Amino acid sequence: MDDLDFTDSELERYSRHILLPEVGAIGQAKLRAASVLIIGAGGLGAPMIMYLAAAGIGRIGIIDDDLVDLSNLQRQVAHTTDRIGVNKAESAAATAKAINPEITVNILPFRLASDTIDDLFSQYDVIADGTDNFETRYLVNDAAVRQSKTLVTAALLRFDGQITTVKPGGPCYRCLFPNPPPPAAVPSCSEAGVLGSVAGILGTMQATEIIKEIMDVGDSLSGRLMLFDGLSMSLRAMKAKQRKDCPACSIAHPETG
Ligand SMILES: [Zn+2]
């Protein structure tokens, strides 16, 4: 049972949440008791961190070894011009704490490494992937599957984005995309560009899904890949199934293969 004691300032801060029948004091207490690890304080991570901090997630971990650059500020809204050159995990943590000093923020100013990823993931309830490369995305997927963690993962390019949730019993990222595309096939945002506000939409969708997963309300995105097109302003869902031959999740969960 979650602790339902809130201070007056918490009750005021979260009043618009607590008013929602789907949230209430119990849902807000679940958010306060939860921990979320955000991988990458970039275009997706920045809005995620800000909304999750505002929502009162009790502990947020931010891992990023990169430094704030002038070219980041068009979309990475947790950073500011005067923090150019500062580590992104540190900068985003400062923004999160300024929004909500009631929460704990773990600053992890290093690179995600394959030999420490399982230990890191084991310390959080939910994992959020805001990275921009396929290598890390598969690494994060596989560790989340091994650790039986819920992972909300998204990707961006130009005016487009996609998002899905990976959790035990459902398809993983490798079930949806068994092989990474050849390096030349998919340009990066630094090569092809991205509309900053599209990063905001996808990162905010990730925050929404994380909050829903923690409170266990609504329909999970597990088994669905949502495709967002900002030019036509449309959103469509593709159904996804767990693959029997998936090297990541069928070994970890053979009974559901
Ligand atoms: Zn899989």
Image: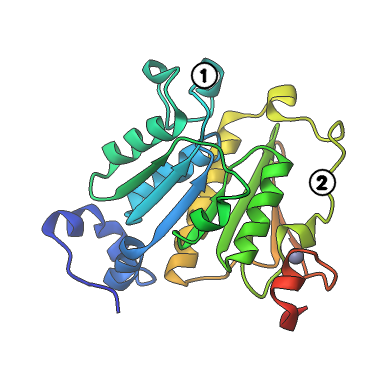
Q: Where does the image place residue 79, in percent across and percent down from the top left?
A: 42, 27
- What residue sits 53% from the left and 34% below the top? 42
Whether residue 23 is visible to the viewer of this picture, yes or no, is yes
Q: Is residue 78 above or below residue 104?
A: above
Q: Quadrant of residue 195?
A: top right
Q: Residue 199 versus residue 111: which sits nearer the camera?
A: 111
**Mark 2: amino acid:** Pro
Horizontally, is 213 left or right of 103 in the view? right
Spatial separation of the CA atoms under disc 1 and disc 2: 28 Å
Q: Where does the image place residue 177, in percent across and percent down from the top left?
A: 80, 54
Q: Secondary structure at mark 2?
A: loop
Figure quadrant, ligand 1:
bottom right
Q: Where does the image place residue 253, in percent across and percent down from the top left?
A: 70, 76
Q: Residues within 10 Å of mark 1 (few under 14, many from 20)?
A: some
Whether residue 164 is visible to the viewer of this picture, yes or no, is no
- The dot on residue 69 is 1
Q: Where does the image place residue 228, in percent across and percent down from the top left?
A: 68, 47
Q: Quadrant of residue 19?
A: bottom left
- What residue sits 47% from the left and 40% below the top? 47
Which quadrant is the C terminus positioned in? Answer: bottom right
Residue under numbered circle 2: 180
Horizontally, is 256 left or right of 88 in the view? right
Marks 1,2: beta carbons within 8 A: no
Q: Residue 207 versus residue 235: which sits nearer the camera?
A: 207
Q: Residues within 10 Å of mark 2 (few under 14, many from 20)?
A: some
- What residue sits 74% from the left and 64% below the top? 248
**Mark 1: amino acid:** Asp
Q: Secondary structure at mark 1?
A: loop
Horizontally, is 78 left or right of 153 in the view? left
Q: Confirm if mark 1 falls within 8 A of ligand 1.
A: no
